[in-house]
Amino acid sequence: MRPNVSALCGLLLVAAFGAAMAQDLPPLPPAIAKVGALHVGVRCDQPPYGFQDKEGHFAGVEVEIAKQIAAYGFGSPDKAEMICVTAENRIPQLISGKVDMLVATLGKTPERARVIDYSIPYNWGGSDILVPKDSSLKKLADIGSATPVAMLKGTTQAAWFDANMPNLETLRLNSVSDALQALKQGRAKSMAADLATLVVIVEKDPTLRRLDEPFAVTTAGVGVRKNEPEWLAYVNASLEKMAKGGLYTKWIEKWVPEDKWALYKTQFPPAKPPAM
């Protein structure tokens, strides 16, 4: 049988492109190289980081990060196979081997760092509180007078409230949309979430406002399993290459409303987080 010359040339071009893209990066770990694709845990309900658009396509800044790592390693962004994860199940998905890495709004905390490894940070961010526009709540200290507070399970916000307001009544839910619905329906009096996420929500819904008192500032990185130093080194080198190439700015301008560019551009890649 005669070989398909066009197909062979295409494969050679892809291989050459991948080699050129990765020439300044460490080698992919053999186990990942052998599979030929990345399985990446991403958020599916948290724009502009990770979400699914109206057609069900994965979108957002973190999805772009995942695609770029695949492009560096395999010559094509399509080699990143996205898997939806929640704040609660993302680390178990990683530890169990269902995903190779997490690019999923994963703020670094001491508790998480005991069970997984983090890449160098690719952004920093704080948390804030969302309330109805006519709410009597004005500052974080007022929260105890109007509960419950809706938040996602397994988030830095949940950990912060456990540590700082352990007796506060909270409503722990699975997704941003669930928490927002609880607030809109009156089942919760406020909602705690990532500041950047709440900025986008308020932009779209004038019936809501932020307390504008950021708390629980953290840096976020790619999560990988413990004891995978070659893979961690590859991810770190990839993130450094993205930053040097100005890719974060490009993705912010693609996925973030223009009037919020200034906020996000101070967070990708991270300067030193402000003391709060």
Image (cartoon, rainbow, N blue to C red):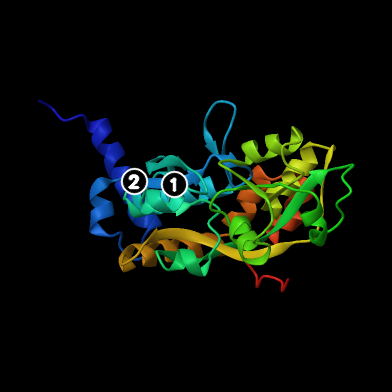
Q: Nearer the viewer, residue 32 or 211?
A: 211
Q: Is residue 72 left or right of residue 107?
A: left
Above or below: residue 1 compared with residue 78 = above
State the CA–CA distance, disc 1 to disc 2. Answer: 9 Å
Residue 240: image location, x then y, percent: 50, 66
Q: Is residue 186 left or right of residue 179?
A: right
Above or below: residue 117 compared with residue 259 = below
Verify CB contact (< 8 Å) between mark 1 and mark 2: yes
Q: Is residue 172 left or right of residue 7?
A: right
Q: Please report the residue visible at 44 percent of the width from the left and 47 percent of the height from the top.
A: 41
Q: Nearer the viewer, residue 2 or 142?
A: 142
Where, by quadrant of the figure, is residue 72 drawn?
Answer: bottom left
Residue 177: image location, x then y, percent: 64, 36
Query: What count of labels does the image hold?
Result: 2
Where, by quadrant of the figure, is residue 228 drawn?
Answer: bottom left
Above or below: residue 180 compared with residue 251 = above
Q: Amino acid at mark 2?
A: Lys
The numbered mark at residue 222 is none
Q: Please report the residue visible at 44 percent of the width from the left and 59 percent of the height from the top.
A: 223
Q: Which quarter of the figure is the N terminus placed in?
A: top left
Q: Please report the residue visible at 71 percent of the width from the left and 74 percent of the height from the top.
A: 275
Question: Crowdedness of circle 1 by 10 Å Cα count: few (<14), some, many (20+)?
Answer: many
Regarding mark 2 in the picture, which secondary structure is present there? loop
Q: Please report the residue visible at 59 percent of the width from the left and 65 percent of the height from the top.
A: 219
Residue lying farthest to the left in this orientation: 1
Q: Which quarter of the figure is the C terminus placed in?
A: bottom right
Q: Which comes before the other along the chain, label 1 or label 2?
A: 1
Residue 103: image location, x then y, percent: 49, 52
Q: Amino acid at mark 1?
A: Gly
Q: Is residue 124 visible?
A: no
The numbered mark at residue 41 is 1
The numbered mark at residue 98 is 2
